[in-house]
Image (cartoon, rainbow, N blue to C red):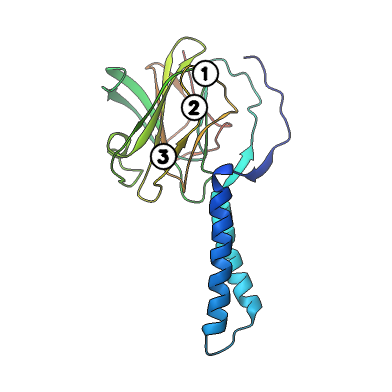
Amino acid sequence: MGKRIKKLKKVRLHREGTNTLFYAGIAITLIAILLWYSLPTKIPFWVFIVVFGIIYGIVVNFYRCPIRYFGGETENIVVAPADGRVVVIEEVEEDKYFHDKRLMISIFMSPFNVHANWYPVDGHVKFVKHEKGNFHKAWLPKASEENEHADVMIEADNGQDVLCRQIAGAIARRIVTYAKAEEDCYIDEHLGFIKLGSRVDVFLPLGSEVCVKMGQATTGDQTVIAKLK
């Protein structure tokens, strides 16, 4: 796809949080007012403003949506689809789609990470499937197959298939996927959003060069996690 031009990075709020932030703001304000009037000892109202302002700030933090642009060559490059930490790098038997061994790299998203997800490669979306399931803790190995998840199969520009899986966790209960079958996709574009964070798995062909280590922090759309052969 050629070399990308670096642009100014900005942070905005994700559209997935519009309703949540609106109603949360009203609820927090009402709770603060009711508590202030109901407590026998009057606490200065500015204390309530500070305390509940911090609570609202935490909610706002969940819906940060930085605008990012990958600044290098994208040919055969696999970028992190999410902010978080690498929790799995291993060869696995993928029997659902590939029916052979794949290299799986998993990134765990804490509630304090950005929850937007990016496409890991440039390519073409072959299909999108949403599977209902359990809500195990996202860092557990069984979460990849047993938890509720959304699968996006991408044919990279070099013809190799890459599977990106959004996984719900014990806290995150809603997966939003923007990817649509038969559409082209590009690094820098949002693949979806997982509310309150969770986990994203990327399944790559064997022989792909791993560029991250276990426990390494990743930045979505910026950290190169692998290179396709």
Q: Nearer the viewer, residue 35 or 152?
A: 35
Of discs 3 and 1, which sits in the foreground? 1
Q: How far from the left and from the top, in percent, is residue 132? A: 31, 37
The residue at the point 36 percent across, 23 percent down is 103
Residue denoted by label 1: 183
Whether tag 2 and tag 1 are in contact, CB under 8 A, the answer is yes
Name the spot of residue 190 as percent of width and height, x first: 55, 32
Location of mark 3 (residue): 199
Q: CA distance from mark 2 to mark 1?
A: 8 Å
Q: Is residue 10 above or below residue 70?
A: below
Q: Are marks 3 and 2 in contact (CB under 8 Å)?
A: no
Toward which corner of the image does residue 166 lie, by quadrant? Answer: top left
Q: Which mark is on residue 11?
A: none
Q: Residue at x 55, y 51 (%)?
A: 19
Question: What is the residue that sits farthest to the bottom in this orientation?
Answer: 40
Judge by depth and name the residue closer to the eye, 90 or 42: 42
User: Reading the chain from its start, which is encountered first: label 3 or label 1?
Assistant: 1
Cα distance in 3D space between marks 3 and 1? 24 Å
Q: Is residue 40 above or below residue 68?
A: below
Residue placed furthest toward the top = 159
| Residue 200 position by quadrant | top left
Q: Amino acid at mark 3?
A: Arg
Q: Which element is circle 1 on?
A: loop
**Mark with earlier residue (3, 2):** 2
Quadrant, the N terminus = top right
Q: Amino acid at mark 1?
A: Glu
Q: Which mark is residue 179?
A: 2
Location of residue 88 in the rendering, given as x and y in whole percent from the top left corner: 37, 35
Q: Secondary structure at mark 2?
A: loop
Across and down, in percent, residue 31 comes to 53, 72
Q: Categorize mark 3 by other alpha carbons within 10 Å: few (<14), some (14-19), many (20+).
A: many
At horizontal 51% and vertical 43% (from top left) the residue drawn is 115
